[in-house]
Amino acid sequence: MIRLFQRHRIRKNREVHGLWEFQTINASDKLSSKRYQLPVPSCWEMHPEFLTYRGKAIYRKYFEVKEKTNIRLEFKGVSHTATVLVDGNIVATHYNAYTPFSVLLPNVDGGEHLLEVLVDNRFTEDSALHIPNDYYTYGGIIRSVILEEIPDCYIEKMKAIPKKVDDEWHLELEAHISNLTDERQKVRMEATIADTRVITPFSEVEKGKTVMIRRSIPIQNIREWSSQKPNLYELELNLYRGEASEPIDDQIDRIGFRTITTLDGHIQLNGENIVMRGFNRHEDHPQVGASFSQTLMVHDLELMKDMGANTVRTSHYPNDELFLDLCDEMGFFVWEENHARGLSLERMQHPKFQEQCLQVNEEMVTNHIHHPSIIIWGILNECASNTEEGREMYKEQIEQIRALDNSRPVTFASHHRAEELCFDLVDICSFNLYPKWYTDEDPKVLVEEAKKWAEELGGKGKPMIMSEFGGDGIYGYRSPTHVKGTEERQAEIIRLNLKAYEEKSYISGMLIWQFADCRVTEGLGFLLTRAGTMNQKGMVDTYRRPKLAYQTVQEIWKKGDKKS
């Protein structure tokens, strides 16, 4: 399943799924003699012969079109570097597992065509973001592949931002119309949402060019989106050529009308202060790797809800859009962030670091901007925000995101304490601190210190989120000693932290590290501390079996021992 709703009623589209032919490629760029059939989407580590394979491979699948047409191929996620070939010709390349990309192929002849995707999940000199880390970089076509048949004049993309002015809702709409023909085209658009229908005046699109059409649409009687009432509306955009009465192309997306503000040291949804309670979550499961089914996504969200949570942080990369659809429908708040975790200044000075981050940011925001569940954009978790050189990169990325979308606050998770240099750049100050795990500090004392750091380092008057805290708990390891690693010790750490933060009126969010245990890269340094190459700070284990800490969270968040 690609999305939870139909994206097109006019444009022909289909998912290119099922079994694809698969071959690995060795260090000498030679194909293996053995051929396999692997499902798409999936991670190749789920195959018994590739449980730990890190390298290159090629996927092949034939597709057919009935007659000559324009083809758009969209890849929702390939991990982590992709080269796409059609009929033996390279048509696209892309870096990063967690953001979608597409390629338009004009004038494709009718008949059968060969689609090949060369995939590489190695940690190479060309990769600044995918490195050995505290999570696992899987290999393969991990998310859906879509094939669309595009008319000669088509809707390239649209952007629709709800805005409330003087208690009245407007939808600020932008549509990009592209012309593939050799002649100037006269077009008009029809936008329909919430029983409101608007037809734009005619626009002319020069041959081979793209024109942007803007329209502010006033909308009456809106039911706002909230965590308790996640109201959603379908926005349908139809494109007409000239005086024709039938549309030639369309785009459909879902919109939630809500406002996000950061005033007086708090976060407001629709003008009301909220407290974000939830979990950091990796896309990781022992049976599917990073390639989740809808069923497994819903199961995760239901477990979070059962603990009393209302928030998910997509640590540390943009998530599958199907998961975001579910958060939209189920009323979860989402902090979605770009892909960069724990990178030193030396790592950030990689010649491709900023380029690759800026690409992720643009693809994340432009593709996920319509999800009302996303109430915060985040960048650069635990990177070198304590250096002047790092600050310049933080500043550029924050400015980029605000230029793409100024309707949401921006933050980053810091672990630099009193050395932080970037709190003045963001709307929310967020701290990754692990009292009673990595240090023996009292959470009640440490949170007061964090508040002081925020106020002194550019964050005065801004909301504050405890973005990571927790400790390891090995599933099934029980001991009356309550030593580190036991479920008992983990539950104690979680209780002490939550109690401390719930007492503070200035805390706007508390996000436990983490929802579920996850696989990490096998490596040296700190990675050697991860027993079994697992980060075991989850409230549930990899198979989603609850630990004692699950009950602790439930008692505090769901059974009433929390601030309103």
Image (cartoon, helix red, strand yellow):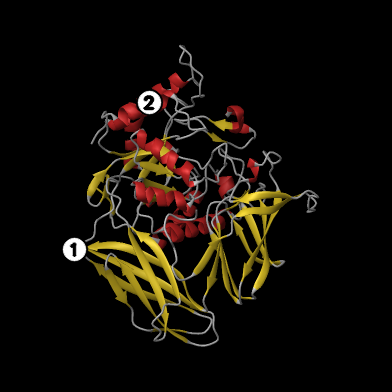
Between the C-alphas of marks 2 and 1, the distance is: 45 Å
Vertical comparison of 43 with 104: above or below: above
The picture places residue 143, in percent across and down from the top left corner, at: 55, 52
At 54% from the left and 62% from the top, the residue drawn is 14
Q: Residue furthest front?
A: 66
Give the left or right position of residue 165, taking residue 15 as reference.
left
Circle 2: is it few (<14), some (14-19), or many (20+) Cα within 10 Å? some
Q: Is residue 180 above or below residue 313?
A: below
Look at the image and tell me in which quarter the C terminus lies.
Answer: top left
Please give the name of the residue rendered at 68% of the width and 38% of the height, measured from the top-left corner. Answer: 48
| Type of amino acid at the residue the image marks with label 2 | Gln
Count of numbered marks: 2
> Disc 1 marks which residue?
166
Secondary element at tag 1: loop
Q: Position of residue 524 (x, y in %)?
A: 64, 33
Q: Which mark is residue 461?
A: none
Do callouts 2 and 1 mark residues in contact (Cβ within 8 Å)? no
Front tag of 2 and 1: 2
Q: x, y percentage for residue 445?
A: 33, 27
**Disc ID at residue 551:** 2
Direction from residue 297 to residue 444 in the image, left or right: left
Label 1, residues with CA under 10 Å away: few <14, some 14-19, many ≥20 = few
- Amino acid found under the numbered disc labelled 1: Asp
Sequence order check, earlier mark of 2 and 1: 1
* Residue 156 vs residue 509, the one in the foreground: 156
Q: Is residue 88 above or below residue 495?
A: below
Quarter of the image where one finds residue 495: top left
